[in-house]
Amino acid sequence: MSFDPVQYKTTTRQQWEDAAEAWHRWGPTVECWLAEATDRMLDGAGVAPGASVLDIAAGSGGQTLAAARRAGRRGRVVATDISPTILTYAAKEAAEAGLVNVETVEADGERLGALAGGEFDAAICRLGLIYLPDQVGALRGIRAALRPGGRVSAIVYSTPDRNGFFSVPVSVIRRRAGLPAPGPGLPGPFSLGAPGALEQALESAGFRDVGVETVEAPLLLPSAAECLRFERESFGALHQMLAAVPEEEREDVWAEVEHGLQQFEAGTGFVGPCELLVARGTH
């Protein structure tokens, strides 16, 4: 079956509409897990007081708020996402934190429209670029949103073997659903993880001074069962894949996923392997 990017985006949007509340609820876990990589991303994008920042695929906005605190009252952060529901949580969190420099805009990361007017100092994307069908095209649009000399930074997963917390569920569900491995150039959690892939995408989009660093980010939870609950409730990509499994078999699939995740349990709890890549580039 050929890949249909329009249908893929429609499904992806609905999955994040459905998962929005859960992703927000798990926010403290997400921010603890991604804290170091997020700081490196904001450094890579040069987010500083007074900066104008574009956040692509912002989700419920943990990194949006971090950017807004760095940018300060003289700065501005525009958080975009394909899911309007998840953006309501980002707006709510910003308001509750007293961050008046945050704006939310529903937008496809590949079609930024009026936002691609060369006005931003920095652009960030935390674990969103990997799910866009046209990654180089999206990066070209992000580049168009930046002023000359503006900087972009993005976080992606590296390779499946370095990200067992996620690759184990993906491999189990893919096998049970009879889904082939994604072909080259198709979106997915590890689509930019191969050596050199992220650098090549940024350079193909016209960025210069490209660099990528590796950040170890183990997912720490009390147990494999808790990791399963986190992923089952809030990882839209897994549900998108699971749709190909008959409904009556899905509980058995989740049980198999939990069994696979138990290999990462130790005396101190669950330590899920996760290796992230943080890329940067300059307009």
Image: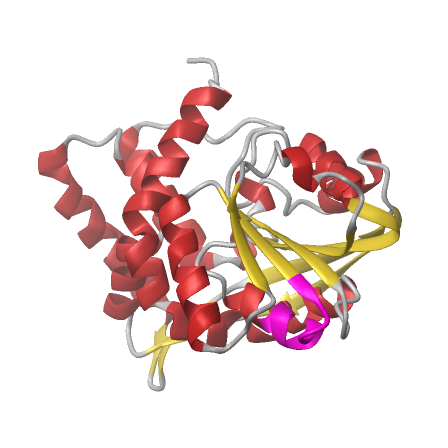
Q: Is residue 170 above or below residue 134?
A: below
Q: Quadrant of residue 52?
A: bottom right
Residue 170 visible somewhere in the drawing: no
Q: Is residue 129 above or below residue 218?
A: above
Q: Residue furthest bottom?
A: 268
Residue 150, given in percent of the width and then of the height, sits at 84, 54
Segment colored magenta: 66-76
Q: How is the image coloured?
A: secondary structure
Residue 83 visible somewhere in the drawing: yes
Residue 207, given in percent of the width and then of the height, sits at 85, 44
Any magenta on residue 145?
no
Q: Residue furthest left?
A: 248
**Which residue lies at the image location 16% right of the left edge and 41% below the top edge?**
250
Q: Quadrant of residue 230?
A: bottom left
Residue 281, given in percent of the width and then of the height, sits at 82, 52
Left or right side of 93 for 107: right
**Which residue lies at the image location 52% right of the left edge and 63% below the top edge?**
274
Tell which of 239 and 84 is nearer to you: 84
Tell which of 145 and 259 is nearer to you: 145
Left or right side of 107 for 85: left
Q: Quadrant of residue 205?
A: top right
**Which residue lies at the image location 8% right of the left edge and 36% below the top edge?**
248
Q: Is residue 157 above or below residue 44?
A: above
Residue 40, given in percent of the width and then of the height, sits at 70, 70
**Which residue lies at the image location 35% right of the left edge and 50% below the top edge?**
169
